[in-house]
Amino acid sequence: MKVFKNQRKITASSKEIFKAFADQTLLAKWWGPAGFTNTFNTFEFKPKGKWSFVMHGPDGTNYPNENIFQEIEEPNKVAIRHNSNPYFTLTVTIEDIEGGAVIHWHQDFDNEEAARNIAHIVEPANEQVLDKLQALVASS
């Protein structure tokens, strides 16, 4: 398995960051790389809840996504199983520190070769997602 790891200190509390995951209106604003938008079809923010959405690329390409929320531990953990290609599990943990919180972003792909083939996309995209999250919570 191939794991991509990102870490980011954000000047917001774990509760504020967790809310950005739990509130579908907020999540739709920051989920995805720069220039991408989302249309959520199903959003059941609970363990074993479904999350189905279409991510719209800046070039007009639509990317259907099917997910299951595997674990939710308010306000410190969200684990999401991505059940469409490419298959992976994303585990996000949030820990409060002085002056904010640290997000640990672990994206564990089922297929190492597939992950290697898209690493050039995934690595900068994950940083862009965290940039958008940081901007969102900083503005609230």
Image: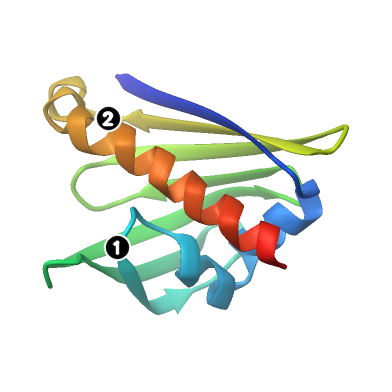
The residue under label 1 is 35
Label 1 packing within 10 angstroms: few (<14), some (14-19), many (20+): few
Q: Residue furthest right?
A: 98
Kind of element beneath mark 1 = loop
Query: Which residue does the image show at 33% across and 53% down from the upper left?
Result: 33
Within the image, what quadrant is residue 47 found in?
bottom right
The residue drawn where x is 55% and y is 77% is: 25
| Quarter occupied by the N terminus | top left
Q: CA distance from mark 1 to mark 2?
A: 27 Å
From the top left corner, tell me how far across and down residue 5 is, in percent: 45, 25
Q: Residue at x 62, y 71 (%)?
A: 23
Residue at image mark 2: 110
Name the residue type under label 1. Answer: Gly
- In the rendered structure, the answer to whether residue 31 lies left or right of residue 99 reads left
Indicate left or right for 115 with 71 as reference. left
For the point 76% across and 49% down, which residue is it? 12
Above or below: residue 73 compared with residue 37:
above
Name which of mark 1 and mark 2 comes first in the sequence.
1
Judging from the image, what secondary structure is the residue with disc 2 in?
loop
Q: Quadrant of residue 116?
A: top left
Q: Amino acid at mark 2?
A: Asp
Q: Quadrant of the C terminus?
A: bottom right
Question: Which label lies toward us, 1 or 2?
Answer: 1
